Image (cartoon, rainbow, N blue to C red):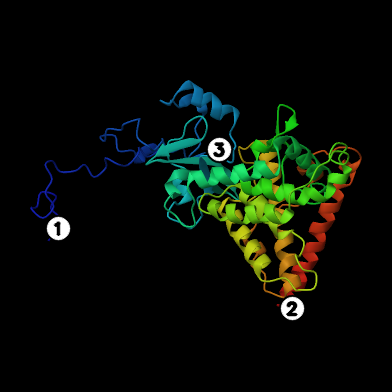
């Protein structure tokens, strides 16, 4: 017996319109007798450029201030209250379906407490990010209360004042960033000076710890009576703060984990424990959640974020391969899953003094050397 919409088993006050939730189809396939609400989530299907609508043809109901803010800051990593994770090609959010949603002039679509942002394509496949509030992960574990997070930040300021911190950040950019380009100068500065407030607690602790040995090269820190904090205490703080960001990933978590992997052995007479392999594996997983495995060259992102994403992708690649080689373990980094585009000089920032001619050359050669290491690992393990 066929389906009867008026049956007692599935009672409706009015029989549902079977086409009520479908957007109009192009050409002769349109349901002309079906009313269409233009405020629906779906936009009109464009057979030539589906899912992309000229901004002038879209209206939105949010405030003018919010609109202007997004238009001038389209970064996926500029908010401390939300996080942006890529909608995978095989997950519950099918990319070809998502591109039919109705997006505003900032390529955003809001529904059910989430936001979707389309940024472009990867090898012809639409790429979308799911932006969600960090408060949705408050019950996840491991997690800490805001009071604990604020206390950790207070401990940081007790160990390193903001004035000293600015000098340590400058030392990092001068002596470490040229060979390990994981930071972004644009994201690290405010009003023309380095600003510790632009860093998460976890990342700031690792930056300080790596910059401490170079205090002797600072014109002020080398002459003042200054007792530097313990690098061990800074790394301990980073260890406590890092896991709290796993549920709400950001580029700063990837940066911090890479710097933690780069830490020198605590005992030169004892072989490394599996900790580094655990750290780089977590870093690899978070990097994929953030879409670092895809080429962002054509995405609608700020130029600094495109450059940073490319450098971070190659840094994850180099560190994972060298850790796997040195500890004799199989690599978790499969190049088939990563769209690693060769870095160019334009992907690097300019640095002070004469280092700007050396920075790209050093890291580019490291990337090429790592590709040889990758071939060795595939043959041996």
Q: Secondary structure at mark 3?
A: loop
| 333 lies left or right of 48 | right
Which one is nearer the viewer's eye here, 139 or 378?
139
Q: Secondary structure at mark 1?
A: loop
Residue 290 horizontal/vertical position (percent): 58, 50
Quadrant position of the C terminus in the picture: bottom right
Q: Residue at x 23, y 45 (%)?
A: 18
The residue where tag 3 is placed is 79
Q: CA distance from mark 3 to mark 1?
A: 53 Å
Q: What label sits on residue 2 in the rendered view?
A: 1
Residue 380 badge: 2
**Disc 1 to disc 2, C-alpha distance:** 62 Å
Of callouts 2 and 3, the N-terminal one: 3
Q: Which image quadrant is residue 300 in?
A: top right
**Marks 2 and 3 in Cβ contact (< 8 Å):** no
Quadrant where the image shows the N terminus = bottom left
Based on the displayed image, in which of its 4 quarters is residue 216 positioned? top right
**How dense is the environment of label 1, judged by Cα within 10 Å: few (below 14), some, or many (20 and up)?**
few
Q: Nearer the viewer, mark 1 or mark 2?
A: 2
Q: Identify the residue at image location x=74%, y=76%.
A: 379
């Amino acid at each position: 017996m066929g389906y009867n919409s008026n049956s007692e088993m599935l009672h409706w006050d009015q029989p549902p319109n079977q086409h009520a939730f479908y957007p109009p189809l192009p050409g002769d396939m349109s349901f002309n007798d079906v009313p269409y609400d233009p405020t629906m989530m779906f936009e009109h299907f464009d057979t030539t450029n589906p899912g992309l609508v000229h901004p002038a043809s879209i209206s939105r109901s949010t405030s003018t201030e919010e609109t202007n803010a997004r238009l001038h800051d389209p970064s996926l990593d500029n908010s401390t209250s939300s996080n942006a994770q890529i909608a995978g090609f095989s997950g519950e959010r099918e990319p070809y379906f998502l591109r039919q949603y109705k997006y505003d002039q900032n390529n955003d679509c809001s529904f059910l407490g989430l936001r979707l942002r389309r940024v472009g394509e990867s090898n012809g496949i639409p790429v979308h990010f799911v932006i969600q509030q960090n408060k949705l992960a408050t019950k996840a574990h491991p997690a800490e209360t805001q009071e604990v997070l604020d206390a950790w930040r207070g401990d940081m300021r007790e160990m390193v004042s903001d004035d000293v911190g600015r000098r340590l950040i400058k030392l990092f950019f001068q002596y470490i960033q040229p060979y390990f380009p994981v930071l972004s100068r644009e994201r690290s500065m405010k009003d023309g000076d380095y600003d510790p407030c632009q860093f998460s607690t976890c990342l700031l602790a690792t930056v300080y710890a790596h910059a401490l040995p170079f205090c002797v090269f600072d014109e002020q820190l080398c002459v003042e009576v200054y007792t530097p904090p313990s690098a061990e205490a800074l790394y301990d703080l980073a260890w406590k703060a890092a896991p709290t960001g796993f549920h709400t990933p950001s580029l700063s978590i990837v940066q911090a984990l890479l710097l933690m992997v780069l830490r020198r052995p605590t005992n030169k007479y004892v072989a490394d424990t599996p900790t580094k392999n655990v750290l780089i594996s977590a870093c690899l997983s978070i990097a994929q959640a953030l879409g670092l495995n895809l080429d962002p060259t054509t995405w609608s992102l700020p130029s600094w974020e495109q450059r940073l994403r490319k450098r971070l992708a190659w840094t994850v690649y180099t560190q994972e391969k060298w850790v796997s080689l040195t500890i004799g373990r199989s690599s978790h980094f499969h190049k088939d899953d990563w769209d690693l585009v060769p870095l160019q000089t334009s992907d690097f920032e300019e640095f002070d003094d004469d280092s700007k001619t050396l920075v790209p050359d050093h890291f580019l050669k490291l990337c090429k050397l790592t590709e040889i290491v990758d071939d060795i690992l595939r043959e041996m393990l």
